[in-house]
Amino acid sequence: MNDSGIFMGWTRTAPGEGAKAMQLYKHLDTYLRTLHAEGRIDRYDMVILGPNGGGVGGFVLIKGNREKLDTLRSSPEFREITVRGNTSLLGFSVVRAHFGDEVRQILGAYQRIAAESAGPAPRWS
C-alpha cells in the first residue's frame, strides 16, 4: 500500500513574481501528469485556497510509494522546481506527508510516548 506523500505548500506569490509563479504552476502540473502517466506517482492534487487569513494559500499533495517519492525528491528536476518555488512563492515548503497505515504507526508512537509521560519519570542514566 502506498501511504506516503509529498506536501508542497505556500502562502502567496512573492511580490513581482506573479509571471514566474504562473510558469511554475503550469510546469509543475505538466511534470506531475507525466510522473503519473509513467507510474512514478499514484496521484496528485493541486489546490488553491480562498482568502482565509491563515498561513496556507495553496498546496500540491503528491501521493505514492515511499521509495519512488524519495527518488523523486532527490531528482535534479524536482530540486529545480523547489528552487523555483523558493524564489517565486512566499512561505514555500516541501515536506513528507503520511496517510493510512503510516498515520496509524505515527499515532501509535505518540500514544506510547504519552503513556510514558503519564507514569513515573523515566530514569535516563
Image (cartoon, rainbow, N blue to C red):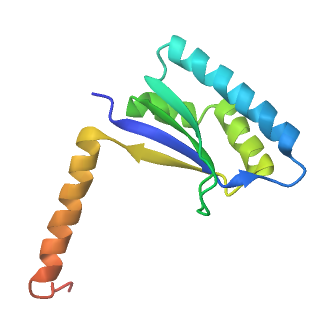
Coordinates of residue 80 in the picture (x, y in percent): 73, 37
* Residue appearing at x 38%, y 37% in the figure: 4
Q: Is residue 106 left or right of residue 8?
A: left
Q: Position of residue 62 (x, y in %)?
A: 49, 33
| Nearest the eye: 21 or 76 | 21
Residue 41 at x, y = what percent? 47, 23
**Left or right of residue 44: residue 52:** right
Name the residue located 56 percent from the left edge and 37 percent from the top edge: 73
Residue 72: image quadrant is top right
- Where, by quadrant of the figure, is residue 1 drawn? top left
Taking the view exactly as shown, the residue that stands out farthest to the right is 16
* Direction from residue 45 to residue 19 in the image, left or right: right
Question: For this rendering, which residue is in front, 73 or 41?
Answer: 41
Taking the image as shown, residue 102 lies to the left or right of residue 120, namely right
Vertical arrangement, residue 102 with respect to residue 70, above or below:
below
Circle count? 0
Q: Residue furthest left?
A: 119
Residue 59: x, y in percent? 58, 43
